[in-house]
Amino acid sequence: MRVPDRPGIAAKLFSELGRRNLDVDLIVQSIHEGNTNDIAFTVADAEAERAEAIAREIVPLLCQSESGEVCDRDVEVNVSRDIAKISIVGAGMIGRPGVAAQMFATMAAEGISIQTISTSEVKVSCTINRADGDRAVAALCQFFQVKYSPKRDAVSSTAPSVRGVALDRGQAQIGVLHIPDKAGMAAQIFAALADRNISVYTIVQSERCRIVNSIPTRDLSFTVNSEDADTAVVLLKELAATVGYESVTIERDIAKVSIVGAGMANESGVAAAMFTALADRGINILSISTSEIKTSCAIQADRAIEALQAVHTAFGLDGTTPIEVPKPARLVRFGVESQLDVREVGEVNDRAYGRDHWAYGYEFSCWLNHRVSTPLNALDLF
């Protein structure tokens, strides 16, 4: 917590974890406070002590300035044990406002507090107290009428770690600060947005719990389409007195660059390679969210093309063939129909916006058992 807010911090941290062969699952970087960031990640119980030791060891390097001087910062390493990660999964979530809100509301009704949140287009993951895991699974399975799937079939070890890189521009990042840390807060916020038909994309809730007026609070952020940003901010400011959070912030002209690949789950250091590619270009990461097959970073929109090119190069996906993709692009394959809002057409190869978007849809179709008639198709607990 409170690491410097500058390019290269995430790259240093996760490169070292990868070098030590430590498998990291969920990665969350929340909106920054002042000139610092919070970065949280999950590991297997058996690796917790080793992960903590590595993190503490690397703190001086993270705080080191470009001149080599160690900055005087109050950096903390906190370890939360006895947690579980619960996820809902489904291609039907794409373009449907309110699915995440339904998940949060269902857990709130059971009195289950959410510690962190990380999302992608087809998955919403939360960390909760492990003791609440069984109740959360039962409640969510009943609400969404799905079966609990604790283990998915293993992905082939020969699958490429990264099959493609995607860029989504025209977004804004909204932050809701100092939300009371109790069950039901996120549900109220996202239900209100869904009622206005505002689609929410990357959701990140921070690990850090701040005490404000003797009340534990957390921050969360999410992205929306730029055209929805003003409406969302007005709505959230009106909602502040009801929910009890302190303020709402907005960062306009945001882009999201993502790597996608089923093989990411089998290989350490993939996220670190992405973060390093961005750091080498001096591109600062505003927030991070991950799933097993996708890592997404929010960055400033004016660095979007440069970021796309850097990540393409890092994973050997360079190319010079212009590919023109209709907007929106509709994919139909293996019984799956989904809609991708592809905003960037430029000097990229067919693996980036041609075949890889087909591969992207293929991976999801296999994972989701070809069902897209309902918002989600599986529920995981780790």
Image: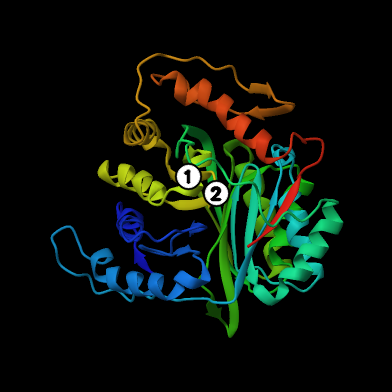
Q: Amino acid at mark 1?
A: Met
Extreme residue in the bottom direction:
214
In the figure, residue 67 lies in which quadrant?
A: bottom left
Q: Are marks 2 and 1 in contact (CB under 8 Å)?
A: yes
Residue 318 is at least partly visible in this image: yes
Residue 1 is at least partly visible in this image: no
Question: Would residue 306 be found to the left or right of residue 134 on screen?
Answer: left
Helix, strand or loop at label 2? It is loop
In the figure, residue 314 lies in which quadrant?
A: top left
Q: In this orientation, which residue lies closer to the viewer: 253 or 64?
A: 64
Of the numbered discs 2 and 1, the one sitting upstream in the chain is 1
Residue drawn at point x = 32 percent, y = 61 percent: 20
- Residue 292's mark? 2
> Which residue is disc 1 drawn over?
264
> Gap in Å between the C-alphas at discs 2 and 1?
7 Å
Disc 1 crowd rating (10 Å Cα; few below 14, some 14-19, many 20+) is many
In the image, residue 138 lies at what x, y percent?
81, 64
Above-or-below relation of 315 to 107:
above
In the image, residue 60 lies at what x, y percent?
24, 70
In the figure, residue 111 lies in which quadrant?
A: bottom right
In the image, residue 272 lies at what x, y percent?
36, 50
In the image, residue 227 lies at what x, y percent?
61, 36
Residue drawn at point x = 56 percent, y = 65 percent: 219
Q: In this orientation, which residue lies closer to the viewer: 63 or 332?
A: 332
Question: Would residue 293 be found to the left or right of residue 50 on screen?
Answer: right
Disc 2 crowd rating (10 Å Cα; few below 14, some 14-19, many 20+) is some
State which quarter of the image contains the C terminus. Answer: bottom right
Helix, strand or loop at label 1? It is helix
Q: In this orientation, which residue lies closer to the viewer: 274 or 326?
A: 274
Q: Amino acid at mark 2?
A: Glu
Question: Would residue 356 be found to the left or right of residue 18 on screen?
Answer: right
